[in-house]
Image (cartoon, grey):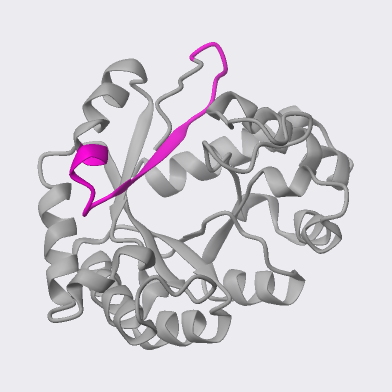
Amino acid sequence: MDLTVRQEVSVGALVIVGADDEQEYARTHAVMGAWPGVRLSIGVHPHAAGPFADEPGRAARLVEERLQGRDTARAIGEIGLDYHYDFSPRDVQQAVFREQIALARRIRLPIVIHTREAEEDTFRILAEESAGEVGGVFHCFTGDCAMARRALDAGFHLSLAGIVTFPRAAELHEVAKMVPLDRLLIETDSPFLAPVPHRGTRNEPAHVVRVAEAIARLRDTTVEAVGQATRENFDRLFNP
């Protein structure tokens, strides 16, 4: 979670908090005080699914507990699957993912999806658990156009981060061109994935303007148009 806040840059923000991380959860008070416009997403990341192997439902109950009393909580996530690192067993990741989707449907909150090298299982579980009823966003999307169409057809938004500014990210450039403007979000994934020209440094929320600039160039439009559309999308999805 990034506590570096640049209020002179006008952006809406969704801060993603690990429900299982006591220190991170406690630090949300500092974020709330520094940045009144921030919204929270709280969930159990697939990397952290392992301790819930004996009872995956505990993950959802913990998330629900964390959501209580947080009137700025607007989503559940990051949730999903990560088969790149396999920090948690895949069957446990899947079970914890399902339980949190069920919670999202019950309390009517959108979900923030993390998926890495797990495309088929991710879309299968989303369909089986009727996740399209609440929708949400594929966080830090790095897939190709075919995967983007699947996500859009499933009823989700796509959020592009600093990778879209990288010169060699050709497939993601095509995604930036094809995603409907009313289904597009932008992010920094701070403190990771700093965009060009800040690549290799610690990322911060203010750098999201670089993402908007890159998308505007790819779509042959203005930064203002991208900024207005993504802000409207953000407000519609996370400020009901």
Identify the residue at horizontal 47%, vertical 63% (top origin).
114
Identify the residue at horizontal 10%, vertical 39% (top origin).
69
Identify the residue at horizontal 46%, vertical 20% (top origin).
5
User: In the picture provided, is 210 more to the left or to the right than 170?
Assistant: left
User: In the picture provided, is 180 more to the left or to the right than 45?
Assistant: right
- Please state the horizontal and vertical placement of residue 106, each as a whole percent of the image: 19, 68
- Is 220 contained in the magenta span? no
- Is 14 contained in the magenta span? yes
Q: Eyeballing the image, is 55 above or below 160? A: below
The outermost residue toward the top is 8
Q: Eyeballing the image, is 40 above or below 121? A: above
Question: Could you say which is closer to the camera, residue 145 or residue 117?
Answer: 117
- Please state the horizontal and vertical placement of residue 216, each as a whole percent of the image: 81, 38
User: In the picture provided, is 202 more to the left or to the right than 174?
Assistant: left
Question: Could you say which is closer to the camera, residue 219 or residue 119?
Answer: 119
Asked which quadrant contains residue 15, the reply is: top left
- Please state the horizontal and vertical placement of residue 13, each as a whole percent of the image: 45, 34
Asked which quadrant contains residue 194, the reply is: top right
Report the magenta residues as a range.
7-25
Identify the residue at horizontal 29%, vertical 81% (top origin).
92
Q: Quadrant of the N terminus?
A: top left
User: In the picture provided, is 212 more to the left or to the right than 239?
Assistant: right
- Please state the horizontal and vertical placement of residue 12, each as a whole percent of the image: 48, 31
Asked which quadrant contains residue 149, the reply is: bottom right
Q: Quadrant of the C terminus?
A: top left
Q: Eyeballing the image, is 196 above or below 103? A: above
